[in-house]
Image (spheres, rainbow, N blue to C red):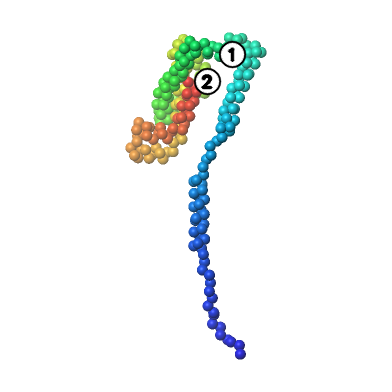
Amino acid sequence: MASTDTTPQPTHTTPQTTDTTGQHDLGGLGAGLDALDAVEVGRTPVREVLTKKVLPPFIAVLLVLGVWQALVSLKVTDETKLPAPSAVWDSLTELWLQGTLFEVIWTSVSRGLFGFLFALAIGTPLGLLVSRVKAVRAAIGPILQGLQSLPSVAWVPPAVLWFGLDDAMMYTVILLGAVPSIANGLVSGVDQIPPLYLRAGRTLGATGLLGARHVVMPAALPGYLAGLKQGWAFS
């Protein structure tokens, strides 16, 4: 007679191994992160540095000298306006032997350097004033932008008429070219400062000159540096 017992028989199931799998995954992730941290940057071969960084500028200089010599050989203009490269080299050699080469170079470099420092001393407070005072910005802002768009060489004839051929003329041209660039660069940098920085500075007591030193100037540094670079180029 067939059995009618319907009692369920106990079954044995294999326990899940999720914990072990999870540990393996975490271990693999950690190994991958360690591998990323352990990446070593190999030294660039000298040959690659020469071909990519040294050779292109050298070729460019040779091309400029070649075009220069070609123009001299074709006698495009008088030798007093466009001397040959060999004549320039002979002049430099003579100045070197006379001991006056560095003196001549310093004459031009010092004018540009001191003119830039004067422009920095004038353009920085002017830029802060224009960027922080609305009335001053409305009055002077368009003038600064107009002066910046005007080439510095345009100031040479009136500067010669006013001051003659001396250092005052040189510094006048440098200031008229560099001051607007520095001031406008600082104004642009101040305009890009998040308002939250200014409010936080005022909350902490950084107002007036203190706020300009500790909040405005550091936050406006990218635009300010761009203005400094352009001002140095004018100098």
Residue 75, numbered label? none
For badge 2, the amino acid type reads Pro
For badge 1, the amino acid type reads Ser
Mark toward the start of the polypeptide (2 vs 1): 1
Quadrant in the picture for residue 85: top right
Name the residue furthest front: 46
The residue at which mark 1 appears reads as: 86
Name the residue furthest bottom: 1
Q: Quadrant of the N terminus?
A: bottom right
Most foreground residue, 4 or 102: 102
Please tell me whether mark 2 sits on a helix, a strand or a loop: loop
Tell me: residue 14, above or below residue 23: below
Residue 172: tell me if it is visible.
no
The residue at which mark 2 appears reads as: 151
Name the residue furthest right: 74
Most foreground residue, 182 or 229: 229
Q: Report the side of 222 relative to 90 (left or right).
A: left
Horizontal and vertical percent position of residue 128: 41, 29
Tell me: residue 219, above or below residue 90: below
Residue pictured at 56% horizontal, 83% vertical: 6
Horizontal and vertical percent position of residue 148: 49, 23
| Distance CA(mark 2)–CA(mark 1) | 32 Å
Residue 204: tell me if it is visible.
yes
Horizontal and vertical percent position of residue 164: 46, 10
Q: Are circles 2 and 1 on residues that touch, CB within 8 Å?
A: no
